[in-house]
Image: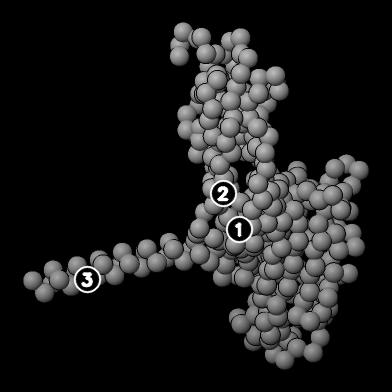
Amino acid sequence: MKKILFILIVLVLITGCASTSQLSGREEGRGGVPDGLTIEFLSPSGNEVREDIFFPVKLKLENNAECIVDGTICIRDTAGSSLSGIVDDCENFNIQKLDKKVPYFTFENNVYENLERDIDTTILAKAIYECNININPFVCVRQDDDKLKDSCPDIQTISGKVGGLKTAPVTVTTIKKKFDASGGLLSLQIYLDEMDKKDGRVVSNNYVKDNNEYGFPISISFGELDVMNDCYTYSDNLKNGIYYWKKDTENIINCEILVSGINEFEDIAVNINLDYTYELEKSKDIKVRYKYSEDV
């Protein structure tokens, strides 16, 4: 009987730990994973609506990013204006980081009219929002002493939440470090990625190139030292503290920093700030049934 009771207690503890782990993952973020606002269509619940019948469009928004998202959600459709259809409308939102209180937005008074037959159309929901994220991983540097290599290796890959990375629509996914202790040269490769390469993109009216590459401010400091002038990319997409996002290639920032005055080995923060506008569009295909259709 005591053995059975012991097993039951262990199972309860394991279940409790698993539940806590799942909750803390949602509350604290996954670290270094590109993710942000998601849009889900709740209504119309099916894939059909009927001519002359009013229906709502209900959306669920969820913020999986470790930044406050502040923006606007708008809806429209692809049908011609002569058929009425979705009322073009927008709502503002401000959702705290990793907010469990998921907001819902309902757009009423949508109706299709003047049909001559069944038609296919698409409902479009577009969110444009701001995200400002501070990322503070640590890298170690050391004196030129091989005995310190175990404590502070010359080559490191920093990733995940334990590495100090954060979840955001555009974020740092990996940092690769190489340190030459003999000369005090620290080399960093900072890898950036975005959450939705198909339906999302960085947008900004303030920073845009002729080829429609949108930019956003980025700052990088090493401890108390501003090192933006020591960072560059393989192409010309980092200029004067503005990073111009590229859709079809890796986004990597390279920094080379001379470090001196080290006491044995030290962990020093790499402070990275990203400040951008992100756009996400989701769609729902529906069929509008003609009111005299025999299938209705």
Q: Which one is earlier in the sequence, the residue at label 3 or at label 2?
A: 3
User: Is the residue 2 above or below the residue 175 in the image?
Assistant: below
- The one nearer the camera, 183 or 61, is 61
Residue type, numbered disc 1: Ile
Between the residue at mark 1 and the residue at mark 3, the CA separation in whole angstroms equals: 39 Å
Looking at the rendered structure, the secondary structure element under dot 1 is: strand
Q: Are marks 1 and 2 in contact (CB under 8 Å)?
A: yes
Q: Quadrant of residue 36?
A: bottom right
Q: Quadrant of residue 86?
A: top right
Q: Is residue 84 visible?
A: yes
Q: Which residue in the structure is indicated by mark 1?
A: 95
Residue 69 horizontal/vertical position (percent): 65, 57
Q: Which residue in the structure is indicated by mark 3?
A: 9
Q: Quadrant of residue 140?
A: bottom right
Quarter containing the N terminus:
bottom left
Q: Circle 3: is it few (<14), some (14-19), or many (20+) Cα within 10 Å?
A: few
Q: Which one is earlier in the sequence, the residue at label 1 or at label 3?
A: 3
Between the residue at mark 3 and the residue at mark 2, the CA separation in whole angstroms equals: 39 Å
- Residue drawn at point x = 83 percent, y = 75 percent: 226
Q: Which mark is residue 61?
A: 2
